[in-house]
Every structure is written in structure tokens, then in C-alpha cells.
Image (cartoon, grey):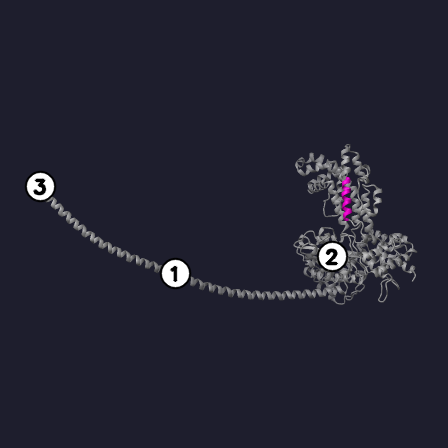
Amino acid sequence: LHHSCRYRKFEPQSLDSWCNRTAHNQQCSLWLQPDPKDACRAYCSICAKDFQIGSAGFGAVENHAKSKKHSDRYMLKLQKESSATSINFYFKPQRSSTSNPSADGTNGDTTTEKPSTLDAKVMKAELRHALNIVEHHRSFASADHGIYKTMFPDSQIAQKFKCQRQKTTYLVTEAIAPTIRNEIIQDINSGSGYFSLAIDESNQAMGSQKFLSIVVSFISITKKKLLILPLKTVSIPDGRAATLEAAVANTCNELGLRFKSCVCVMSDGPSVMTGRHGGFHTLMDKHAPHLLKMATCSLHHVSNAARAACDKLGKKAENLADLVHSYFLYTSRWTRYEHVQDMLELQSHRFLRRVETRWIQLLPVVNRLVEQLEGLREFFLKRLRLENPNDLKKESVQSIQSLLADDEVEFDLLFLQAVLPMLDKFEKAFQGNNVKIHLMYIELRMLFKELLACFLTKEHVASNAKHLSRMKFPFEACLPDNQVFIGEKARNFLSTRESADVKKVCIVRARQFYNELTQYLQSHLPLANAALRCAQFLDPSKVSLVDSSYPVGLAKEMHFSEQDISTIDTDFRRLSLALCSKDCDKLQDVEVLDFWLPVVNATLSGVGTAEEGSVYEYPALRKLVLAALSIPHGNAAVERVFADLTDLFSKKRSNLDIRTIDGCLLTRGFLKSTGLTCEMFHFNDAYINAGFHARHSWKQHLERQREENEEKQKKLAKERELAVEIAQEIKKATHSAQLQAKEESIRKRRLEVDAQADRAAAMLDEYQRQVAALAIERKTLEKETEGLKEKKRKLEEKATKSTIASYFKK
């Protein structure tokens, strides 16, 4: 086999392979064609013009796709095809038709589905309708209408079209999302089998749920690109490391993914993830020691380092941003400030809100403040005193005036405007879904060295370039004040200040900023990670420049067998020899996948997909490359999933269950990753059958619900009858008890009355006895009285007689 024949497949001008790719979210197969006159030019069928590709390669195609004229015409073409495909194809009366996969799009499956029955056509229309709702984040309740029947009364499909809220939900959760997930699993297993995971948990519960998002990345052989998809979103009770580890393991087992084929698990860097004793990665190492020892997300570390360094400057600049944004939220105040903008000829831009959780979000806020600084001083320090003096009494206005008059605040703004772009550039470079793992090592070290060179001598940085993770920052290596990088604007600002103390303080604060920033990065970034260093061989421009120790070193880090490592060494040497005799300068602009996919698919019978019985030319290197290309270079993909989750889980849609949330996120993520839309998506037999199965399952579910409801109704009826009987029995028992209680009360009362009567009779007898005794005593006393009276009478008579006798004697 001649290497020249094989090498032609690696040429960047291979339009056949480019047609399967997307440029600026546009399917190239819809418009990109080769120029028959010149092999170095391509033809755009939408713009009806050719353009130069030359050495720019696929970048020229992307530049053409980004042009405004082409984008407008491309959208117009999609709208026309959408109306022809989505409406006319489904809703006009059709006698016979066949599906056109080229117009309908492709999901990487070459099989076509030809609806032969009306039900299949209706199901396909309903699936596309559900996909459209998910793609555009529309509420499922928006499907509660029958407008299509009214719009297309002469269409059989429209008359049978029934896809309202409940049906749309189960088509997404039971048909579209499971079929997409099965395609993903099949795509992983049919390729190299290697994949990587990235996880993150929601910082706070949404509604009553806390979510864990699991994102998978792998090289799709069928789609010929890196796919980064939300594999599963699960609800978790808490954010403990053991809970996260169990959720990841259960998800892989549930979906049939071989966890031994997982290359690494990427996450952010909190203690629950990185703890040495009970962290997530520690638990994963115990159960899966083969996982690549990658550092946590470098994008998070760079953002956190910037935040920590800004804290060293103080909170004055951030406080000014917060106060200014809050003050101008009122329309009347902003209207007055617009007059200042017009007078000073400033850009009519509103002030931005500072968000702590966004990566390097302080930079646009600082840029806006610097842009409007002159206007702010004119408004708060001059005009406000004349136009609205009452505002001067407010504490917020007084704080703004104080900050605007502070030299340190202006220096901080100008200094941050000069320094933060270095960090922002790195963040933006690695936020995409393209293969960037081969650039991570050199870019991390370059960023760190650039920051060191801002306040340390270049000799010290160069002498410690090989051990950046251990280098010191001695005072002797610091640059003099006039050479510390603070930006030209900040330096010009200090030159206008007369006080030497102000200049000295500002430079010292800048040094503190750099010191905190670099120390944080040094302690958190993987500046000496062996896997990242060895992954540089994936760069097409370095394949012929590096030796086999790079792929061999990466294979050792990934725990390949000794036999595989030896074969990898041999495969890479043969590949390097094949490239040495070629023009390697052409590989400078070749995309990573454009170079490696033909290599890994090359067989002994030629370059292409291996057929049954054929043997790959680089079998061990193929496994290593496909595994290495799946390594995520950050956790940005998970953050994008949470952004979609925030849009999906709004206040008006807070009752979505976890299956619906997972289905929507997976479907939307698949559309984004593959560059498809609801118009371009190809529904093959698997989707149609899944739709029918979902409908059948839903009908069975409704039937079971109906039967359960009937059983519940019968049970409730029996319970009501039993309750009535029990109530009657209770009523009877209560009445009987009441009667018994009354009888007992009467009996007790009767006994009490009898007792009282007995007591009264006894008292009466006693009284009668006492009366009789008194009567007898009375009679006795009367007799005694009569006797005494008689005695008295006799004595009186005797005394009278005696007196009379005495008188007469005298």
C-alpha cells in the first residue's frame, strides 16, 4: 500500500467530508459544492458564487457561512423548505409520496422511512410538532389547540392530528428522548466504546427538587464529530459525594454503558468533589481506579482566581458598579442621564448588572463603567445638584459621588480593563464544544507565564518555565514599579496625579492583585499534568514533530495494557514516517477531527470505514485517539445544561417532573450538538415505532387509570355505604345509650328522691316525737304553773288576811 494514496484522504480540501459538517450552525450539505473549474475553490449554491478555500481550509467555509448575506439567504431557504416540508408535506392532500431524507435532514442514520399509511404520516407530524415545542422552549400547554384542523380542513392528516399537552409530553419523554438516548448508546458502543463524563449539581433546589446533570462526550464515528450531550438529568436528595457517586454509577448501569470504557469524569472544584477523604473523585477512584487523573475544570479555577484577586483590590469598583446599576433602574433617572450622553456624545449604553456566578463577567461591567465614566461624573457631581437636589440626601447617591471622586476606584477600573481580557480570552477559547484537549496544556502554561511576566522579570519566568507549579515569587524577581503591567490607560492616569503616595499605593495594590491571582492559579491549575502534556500529540501540526513518548505516556496514564502500549508505540511511529515525506505545513490549518478520523478509520484495504472482516491499520492508536479526543477540557457543557434548565424550569412551569425535564434537556442538547433543527430532523422507523409504542403505552396507562379510577369509585361507594351503615349503627347505639343513660339518670333520681323522702319521713317522725314530748312537757309545765298560781293565790290570801288582822289589832 502506497502512503500517498492514504495521505490524500487527509487533505483539508476534501469537500465530501466537509458536507457532513456544520458551519455556523448551518448544514454544509445544503449549500456547499465543489468548484468544477478549480479544486482550491468551493461553490455556494445559495449565494450562487464561488470562494477561495486554499490554505484556510474549513475556516474559509466557516467565514463564508458567518457572512450576513449568506446567513440571511440560508434562513430564507430554511423557511421555504420548512413551509414545504412541515406544512405542505403533512397537511395537503397526498395521493402518494416518498420521504426525502436530504430535505428532511439526517441524524447520522442512512436508513429512510417511507410512510405508507396515514397513521404513520400523522405520527411523524406529531413527533415533529413535539420536537418543535422542545427546541423553542415553548410550554406544553401551548399545544392545547386544534388550529390545524381549522387551517387545513381538506387534509386528512390535519383532521387526524391530535397532539395537545399530554400527548406532546409523552411523545417527548417516551418516544423522542429514549430513542435519542438509544442512538447515543449505540453510537458509543459501535465506535471505540470510549466516552467521558462531566457532572455538576444545581447550587440550589429548583422547586422541591435538586438536580444532577450528567453530560457525556464521545467521538461519533457515524456523525464524524465530537458529541457533547446531556446524557441524563436526575433528581438527588442532597449534594453529598456518596449520593453523586451512586447517581453516576446507577445511570451508567441503567443505560448499559460499560464504566470500564469511561476515560475520565470532569467536575468543578468544590470540596465535595475534590476532598481527599470523602470527595467524589476519591470515591470514584476506589471503584474505578482506571479513570484518568484529570484536574477539575480549569475554567472555574480561572474565574475563581479572578474573583479572589479582585477582592485584594477591595470592593470599591464592584460597589460602584452595583450602585450605578441599581440607581438607573428607574426610567426617569435614565432619561435624565440620556441627555448627558447626548451632550458628551457618549454611546447610548445601559449599565450592566454584575453577576458573581458568571465567568469573568466583571470585564464587560468594567468596560461599560470606563466608557461612561465622564458621563457619570457630569451627572452625579454637577447636574444632579441642579436638577434633583433631593437625591443628594440619599445614602446611595452620596456613596456614588464618593467613589467617583476616589482616584483608587478609577485606577482599579482602568487596571482591570487591561488585565481581565487575558483571562477572558482563555475562558472564551475553551467554552465551546470543539476538541481542545490538545491545546489545554500549552494554553494553561502560556496564560500563567503571561500573568507572571506582568510583575516578574522575564529571566525569572524563563528559568522556571519547566516547573511552573513549584516556582517561587521572590522579591528580587519583581519588576520595578515603572515596568509592572497595569495598562496604558492606568499608567497615563497615574502620570496625571501629583501625589507620589497615590502612585505607590496603586502599584502596590496591582502587585497584590497579581500575587493573589498567580498563587491561586498555581495551586489549582494542572500546570504539570502528565495526561494534558502527552495529549499534545493530537495536534495535527505536531504529529510529525513529537516522538512516540507522548501517545505512550498518555496510554500509561489511561491504564492501557502493556501489549496495547507497545502497539501504540509502533502505530505512531508508522504514522509519523508516513507524514514525514509529506508537506506537513498543510496540517497547520487542519481541524483535529478532519485529520484523525481518516487515520482511525484507515484499514489495510484502504481508508474508510472498516467493513466486516477488515482490519484497522492503526488498531491500538485508534483506541487511544478516540478515547483521548473524548476528554472534556472543561465543565462548560454542564453549565449550558443548567442554563437550559433555568429556561425550562420557570415559575410558570415549576411542576414539571424529572422525566419531562430530562427528556427536554436531552432532546434540546442533541439538536444543538448535531446542528439539527425540527425541520431538518429525520424521523426514521425507530422514532415512528417508538411514537406508536408510546401512544399505545399511554392508552394502556389511561385505561389502567380509568380502571383504577373505577375501582377507586367502587371502593369509595362501598366505603360510603359502609360508612352509612356504620353511621346508622352508631346512631342506634347512641340512641340506645342515651335511653339507658336517661333511665339510669331517672333511677338515680328516683333513688335520690326516695332517700330524701325517707329522710323527710324520719325527720317528720322525729319532729312528731319531739312535738309529743313538748306537748307532754307543756302539760306538765301548765300543771306546775297552775299549782304555783294556786300557791300564790293562797299565799296572797293568807297575807291579806294577816294584814287585815294586823290592822284590826292596831
* Residue carrying label 1: 748
In the displayed structure, does residue 734 sit left or right of residue 703? left
Q: Compute the Cα span from label 1 to label 3.
A: 83 Å
Q: Compute the Cα span from label 3 to label 2.
A: 153 Å
Q: Compute the Cα span from label 2 to label 1.
A: 82 Å
Residue type marked 1 = Lys
Residue type marked 3 = Ser
The kind of secondary structure element at disc 2 is helix
Which of the two residues, 471 or 587, is positioned nearer the viewer here?
Answer: 471
Q: Splitting the image into 4 quarters, where does residue 255 fall?
A: bottom right
User: In the image, is residue 132 above or below residue 504?
Assistant: below
Question: Residue at position x 78%, y 40% from top?
Answer: 511
Q: For label 1, count other residues whose C-alpha is less than 10 Å away and answer few (under 14), some (14-19) or many (20+).
A: few
What numbered label is drawn on residue 806? Answer: 3
The kind of secondary structure element at disc 1 is helix
Marker count (numbered): 3
Label located before the other in sequence (3 or 2): 2
The kind of secondary structure element at disc 3 is helix
